[in-house]
Image (cartoon, rainbow, N blue to C red):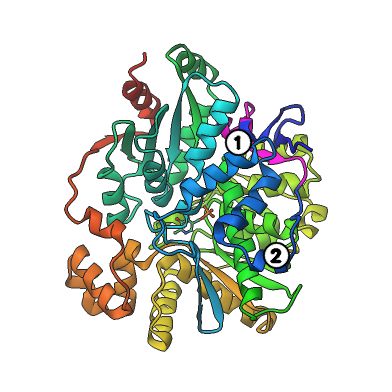
Amino acid sequence: MELMYASTRDANEKVTASQAILKGLANDGGLFVPTELPKLDVSVEELAKMSYQETAYVVMKQFLTDFTEEELKNCINAAYDSKFDTEEIAPLVSADGAYYLELFHGSTIAFKDMALSILPHLLITAARKNQVKNDIVILTATSGDTGKAALAGFADVKGTKIIVFYPKNGVSPIQEKQMVTQKGDNTFVVGINGNFDQAQTGVKQMFSDADLAETMNAAGYQFSSANSINIGRLVPQIVYYVYAYAKLYANGVIAKDEKINVVVPTGNFGNILAAFYAKNMGIPIAKLICASNENKVLYDFFTTGTYDRNREFILTNSPSMDILISSNLERLIYRIAGNDAKKNADFMKELTTTGKYEITAEMKEKLADFYGNYTSEEETAKVIKDLYDKTGYVIDTHTAVASGVYAKYKKDTNDTKTKTVIASTASPFKFTRSVMDAIDEKYDSMSDFELVDELSKIANVKVPKAIEEIRTAPVLHDTVCEVNEMQDVVKKFLNIK
Ligand SMILES: *Cc1c(COP(=O)(O)O)cnc(C)c1O
């Protein structure tokens, strides 16, 4: 049976999986959601014997029902190959009573690779299925990691162009260097004088601009999105939660049907939503623990039922979570509103006009699966140092937010027994300065690449290829624009008027 996708803002807009991937965002500005969440059709015993690629197939086939087995397997095998520096793709590391699910072994050393190494293949397959003649223009706003992972995924992919907007002063030096050194004639990287929310809003506006779409079409182009608003990003992210559960079972850490907790350092709410989908597929997950940095809009939402982005935007040392408008939360709001597009659309309109909305008591009750908390910058740094001192294991700033929130969760709830997986979303090498400063302030005087070598020494981990590559790479992109110039920049790059 074919699974259809509906817009979270218009009950009448229904498309197939491949169409949802192609479009990225629905016409009305809503997000595509499956009309029902499918169940896994394999047992944990079977899953326990599967490779990452095999797991990916049994999970993704339930969602992408208009892809043939061959198409889907081709996409999976092209994505999860030697671009990853470990055969396991997503290894679990046990440290200090938790299981760190390392999602950063792909080509750009952040968890975005888990989805963005397969998205180009899904998208090209979807274009072929739907007889699309236009070139696909991937338009992306990034808080640092999506940009590079999307660039790496789409560089030199025939029939595509990719344009990435990032906040000029809102990413780490290594993140910026990774992006502006990107090769490939079809790639374009732009810094904006603004923050991530402004970049994301500008991109969303271009998506829902009918005039622009027409101009693009006349020139042989159409937009799609590599942001986590694209369902083609979300579905591959469900896989590693299923995989992690099966590995814990295979390793004898948990018994059959034993529940685990999952902690996710959260920004746009994509990664944790994928964990929620995994739970709905049948994976025994007790709590979904949503970890925020000082931009704690989600913590406030889970505690009060009011989502309020009217607050100062704080630049932290976990920049990929510096977000006040968590786009994917809309998919959850739609669901707890009883899949009511009208009701959800009203909330989203309030968010646009007043910057906030309050859900009903009935909706709030449906959030019982979630626990939210946050860490301050100081607490995050202390988590990195304490874990290193105690175990020698070095985690990045985002993962440290999750680890710190897990400690708060245990204190708050006394739930210290449930085995817990912490999504480790970036390599510490991507945020070397923040990580090393946390461990010892003596490192402050070293250069970025001296720090890389020092980190390699103290953590006893080889410098990842992604970092070696940018040591000497020339800067190839230096465009910077104002927020209100984003559309002009896109037109210029595509050479359209
Ligand atoms: C993107 C990102 C996050 C946030 O993930 P969301 O899916 O946006 O919630 C957390 N950590 C790192 C390192 C990231 O790159």
- In this rendering, position of residue 188 left or right of residue 443: right
Residue at the image position 54 percent from the left and 21 percent from the top: 132
- Image quadrant in which you'd find residue 392: bottom left
Secondary structure of the residue carrying numbered label 2? helix
Furthest toward the bottom, the residue is 390
Locate the C terminus and report the quarter of the image it occupies: top left
Which of the two labelled residues, at mark 1 and mark 2, occupies the earlier sequence position?
2
Tell whether position 21 is magenta.
yes
Q: Amino acid at mark 1?
A: Thr
Considering depth in this image, is 81 or 147 the residue closer to the camera? 81
- Tell me, yes or no, whether the two marked residues, 1 and 2, touch with CB atoms within 8 Å: no
Which label was assigned to residue 46? 2
| Separation (CA) of disc 1 from disc 2 | 49 Å
Quarter location, residue 252: bottom right
The reply to whether residue 228 is in sight is no
The percent coordinates of residue 184 (x first, y second) are: 29, 36
Establish if 150 lies above or below 86.
Answer: above
Q: Is residue 254 above or below residue 27?
A: below
Which of the pair 120/201 is nearer the observer?
120
At label 2, which amino acid type do we have?
Answer: Glu
Residue 37: which numbered mark, if any?
none
Which residue is rendered at x = 33% and y = 40% of the image? 193
Q: Is mark 2 within 8 Å of ligand 1?
A: no
Residue 376 in picture, x, y percent from top left: 47, 70
Q: Quadrant of the N terminus?
A: top right
Q: Is residue 26 left or right of residue 102?
A: right
481 vs 49: above or below: above
Q: Which residue is mark 1?
A: 353
Local SS, label 1 = helix
Q: Percent from the top left, x then y, of residue 355?
A: 59, 43
| Magenta region | 19-36
